[in-house]
Structure formats: structure tokens, C-alpha cells
């Protein structure tokens, strides 16, 4: 089976700063992949490269058999942003936000049709936000906001979903809802890449873990990748102290 995403030998600089150095990876269809790395390790840069909003200096990226930009425009790939990047004062209801996931599907008139309303309602139900659908987006808790943006990705019917820190500032019930829905999406064949600092959540969520530090340090089964030795490499933790 063709991988959903193929990244080959990608290098990215911002001026003098090298953010990614020869990164190669594949994301397999219908699997959940966790991207783990310290602040500044290049996670957001890798996301932007896969979304086709940033062009690498060298290397190639293929998404769903297309260029990343084409995959984004066709709606094949979707993105659930970090909360900090969203303007929560914007006068949109939860339902409106989820409907933005349907923009790629709207026809020439740009008017939502029955299929669009049905997709939005189904996505709201999946993340358990039906009761809050008409509330302004800023009047939600942190976990509810994350679920609203996850619903937008679900309504989009994207084949590949990237999620930036979906568990940051999220309580346990919301974390459980998000985890359950991501596993259900993967079972439906959706390919998922999440960046997270929440190492404890990874084994129950991801099929594969990738450790990033400008390049891929390790990848594979979460339990193997999250070994004390690898975590020491990726986070500079002196785990030998903890074993004494
Ligand atoms: N627009 C930019 N201009 C200059 N340097 C940048 C820019 N964006 C990122 N960088 C640098 O590139 C490196 C990788 O940044 P990136 O945002 O990809 O890391 P990250 O792993 O997503 O970090 P975090 O966990 O803090 O979100 C960092 O050294 C960062 O300072």
C-alpha cells in the first residue's frame, strides 16, 4: 500500500537557523503517528512542510500521491492548530467553525447543502459538542475548543489529519474523547500525525512514535522509541539518576 505521506531528505532553514536536517519518514495509511520532540526541535516546521505552506530548501514531500499544496487545496489533508494560533474572540459559533472544514466541498455558490450540514452534525456528535453547537467559540473550555477543531477536521473528511498539541490544556475526559475519536478515524483509514509533549498519552494512542531533533532520532513502536536512552537523547534528561 502506498504511504499516505512520504518525506524524503527534507532540509529547512530560517535564515541561519537550520530547523530540519535531512528528515525522511513515511506515514502509513490508517495509522496514528506521534511526533515527539523538545521546543524548537522542528515539529511545527515539519507540519508546515507536509501541509505545503512551507517549501523545503531541499528534499521532497508527497501527500496522498500529490504535492502537499495540491493535497491541501483538494481537502485531502487537514490541520488541527495549536490553540495559541486561533483568534478566540472571532464571532463564530462552534457550528460555524466546524462548517469551515466543508469549504473544500462547497460548490460554486459557496452555500452549504444538506450533505454539508449532515457532515457537520455528525462531526459535532462524534466529539460530543452537539449541545454547545451554537455557542461562540471563545466561550468554550480548552478541551472543548480542541474538540471543536477536531470536529472541523472530521467534517472535512480529510484522508490525512495533522494535529498540533491536541492534549495541551485538556482535562482527562476531553483527552479520552479525543483519543477515542482519533483511534476511530484511524480504523476508518484516516492517517494521523499528532505532535505532543504528553509522553504518557502516546502508548495508548499511537501505533508509531517518531522522535525529532531537527532529524529523526528514532521511530517505531512507542514502547521501544520511548526508552530511557532515547528520551535522554531527545530531551537531555539524565534518566540514570532516576534509576538509582
Ligand atoms: N519564522 C521563523 N524564523 C526564524 N526561525 C524560526 C522561525 N520559525 C521557527 N524558527 C526556528 O526553527 C527551529 C524549529 O522551530 P519549530 O517551531 O519548528 O519547533 P517546534 O518543535 O515546533 O517547537 P515548539 O515545541 O516550541 O512549538 C527553532 O530553532 C525556531 O527558533
Image: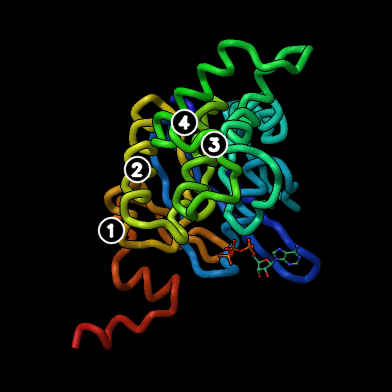
Measured Cα–Cα span from mark 1 to mark 2: 26 Å
Residue, disc 1: 224
Q: Residue visible at 38% across and 76% down?
A: 232
Q: Determine whether the beta carbon of the residue marked 1 sits less than 8 angstroms from the nearest atom of ligand 1.
A: no
Residue 117 horizontal/vertical position (percent): 56, 18
Mark toward the viewer: 4 or 2: 4
Q: Which corner quadrant of the figure contains ligand 1?
A: bottom right
Mark toward the viewer: 1 or 4: 4
- 150 horizontally vs 183: left or right: right
Measured Cα–Cα span from mark 4 to mark 3: 27 Å
Which element type, helix, strand or loop, lies under badge 3?
strand
Residue 111 horizontal/vertical position (percent): 72, 16
Tag 3 or tag 1, which sits nearer the N-term?
3
Which element type, helix, strand or loop, lies under badge 2?
helix
Residue, disc 2: 177
Residue 162 horizontal/vertical position (percent): 53, 43
Instruction: Out of 172 and 15, give the one closest to the viewer.
Output: 172
Cβ–Cβ under 8 Å for marks 1 and 4: no
Instruction: Out of 39 and 115, give the one closest to the viewer.
Output: 115
Residue, disc 3: 5
Q: Is residue 166 above or below residue 153?
A: below
Which element type, helix, strand or loop, lies under badge 4?
helix
Instruction: Out of 141 and 80, give the one closest to the viewer.
Output: 141
Tag 3 or tag 2, which sits nearer the N-term?
3
Cβ–Cβ under 8 Å for marks 4 and 2: no
Residue, disc 4: 124
Task: Kindly tell me whether residue 134 is visible in this rendering.
Answer: yes
Q: Residue visible at 44% across and 70% down?
A: 234
- 21 horizontally vs 207: left or right: right
Measured Cα–Cα span from mark 1 to mark 3: 23 Å
Measured Cα–Cα span from mark 2 to mark 3: 26 Å
Cβ–Cβ under 8 Å for marks 4 and 3: no
Amino acid at each position: 500500500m502506498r504511504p499516505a505521506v512520504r518525506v524524503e531528505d527534507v532540509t529547512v532553514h530560517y535564515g541561519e537557523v537550520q530547523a530540519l536536517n535531512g528528515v525522511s519518514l513515511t506515514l502509513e495509511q490508517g495509522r496514528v503517528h506521534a511526533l515527539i520532540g523538545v521546543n524548537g526541535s522542528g515539529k511545527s516546521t515539519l507540519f508546515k512542510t507536509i501541509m505545503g505552506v512551507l517549501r523545503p530548501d531541499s528534499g521532497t514531500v508527497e501527500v496522498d500521491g500529490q504535492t502537499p499544496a495540491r493535497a491541501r487545496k483538494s481537502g485531502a489533508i487537514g490541520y488541527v492548530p495549536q490553540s495559541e494560533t486561533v483568534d478566540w474572540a472571532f464571532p463564530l459559533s462552534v457550528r460555524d467553525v466546524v462548517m469551515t472544514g466543508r469549504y473544500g466541498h462547497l460548490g460554486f455558490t459557496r452555500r452549504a447543502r444538506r450533505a454539508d450540514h449532515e457532515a457537520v452534525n455528525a462531526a459535532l456528535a462524534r466529539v460530543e459538542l452537539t449541545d454547545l453547537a451554537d455557542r461562540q467559540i471563545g466561550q468554550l473550555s480548552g478541551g472543548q475548543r480542541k474538540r471543536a477543531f477536531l470536529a472541523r477536521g472530521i467534517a472535512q473528511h480529510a484522508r490525512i489529519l495533522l494535529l498540533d498539541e491536541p492534549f495541551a490544556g485538556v482535562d482527562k475526559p476531553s483527552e479520552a474523547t479525543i483519543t477515542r475519536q482519533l483511534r476511530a478515524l484511524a480504523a476508518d483509514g484516516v492517517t494521523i500525525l499528532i505532535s505532543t509533549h504528553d509522553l504518557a498519552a502516546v502508548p495508548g494512542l499511537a501505533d508509531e512514535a517518531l522522535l525529532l531533533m531537527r532529524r529523526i532520532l528514532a521511530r517505531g513502536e512507542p514502547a521501544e522509541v520511548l526508552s530511557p536512552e532515547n528520551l535522554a537523547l531527545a530531551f537531555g534528561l539524565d534518566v540514570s539518576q532516576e534509576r538509582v
